[in-house]
Image (spheres, rainbow, N blue to C red):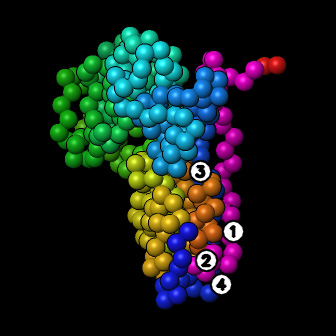
Amino acid sequence: MTELPSHAPALASGSEILLAEPRGFCAGVDRAIEIVERALTKFGAPIYVRHEIVHNTFVVNDLKEKGAIFIEELSDVPPGSTLIFSAHGVSKAVQTEADERGFQVFDATCPLVTKVHVEVAKLHKEGFEFIMIGHKGHPEVEGTMGQLDSGIHLVEDVADVARVQPRQTDKLALVTQTTLSMDDASEIAAAVKARFPSVREPKQQDICYATQNRQDAIKVMSPQVDVVIVVGSPTSSNSNRLREVAQKLGTASYMVDNADELQPQWLEGRSRVGLTAGASAPDVLVQAVIARLRELGAVSVRKMDGVVETMKFPLPKGLKPDAS
């Protein structure tokens, strides 16, 4: 780890780290990583994974070392290989191409994303068009929009809502990316509802339980601290949203991929640091950041009270543990 220069700013004396609860891995991420690890154990390397299995540099590099090869184009996968779809989900076109190429496929799509896909397919059969709230280019959005050839209109902000032009409005349904900020999504959804009063809203909130729990924890923690550090990779949507939630509450907030990215000047004179991690960030990275904060003057760590997550998703057939 990088040595701290003797003249570098540091935390105020007696500083405390407040640890958000819950933080880090969610059930969908646990399942996705386990699918890759079990496939490697059962079939041997290499195992091919379309897109990063989850958006975390440490996790992806660890799986690469174990024999996973991450690709974007299925043409890069040799015939007869084992292929895993990432936790973000894929379009129907990708599923069809994988079938045509004859790969052995295991789907690590988060079941909460699959729930959105199932709802889209069901309502499409009933003649619905869709407005999707999400970030253009995100693999989850591409996967959900790719469930249909047409009829899903993406909106990224309130301004987009005024511009969207569905072919009809009698049967219009709303879906969202699962890793958005709840507040931002609610604001955009309200704009959709105002323009299209008869729009069908999701039966259950599309934003996943883990995203919601981590954002709720940040809202409780932010007013109690001087600065918030979020552990997560730049490509992680839910990690970015955590930093934004803290920032909007008026607390200085920063995101780091690992402990080496922590900048001492962020902490100068601060006496209480809030620490959390996105749903794709492993706890080993959080512990490394805690160690670095101790080097910079933190003397205690206090874990907040919070929701205890017990959700667990089943593995695909062919990778479940032997019943014996």
Residue at image mark 3:
282
**Is 279 contained in the magenta span?**
no
Q: Are marks 1 and 4 in contact (CB under 8 Å)?
A: no
**Is 313 contained in the magenta span?**
yes
Residue at image mark 1:
302
Label 4's element? loop
Q: Which residue extends farthest bottom?
A: 7
Q: Is residue 217 visible?
A: no
**Label 4 Cα neighbours within 10 Å, binned few <14 / some 14-19 / many ≥20:** few
Residue at image mark 2:
295
Q: Are marks 2 and 3 in contact (CB under 8 Å)?
A: no
**Whole-Å distance between the Cαs marked 2 and 3?**
21 Å
Instruction: Point out the stretch of residues depicted in magenta.
Output: 294-322
Residue type at mark 1 is Arg
Q: Are marks 1 and 2 in contact (CB under 8 Å)?
A: no
Residue at image mark 4:
14
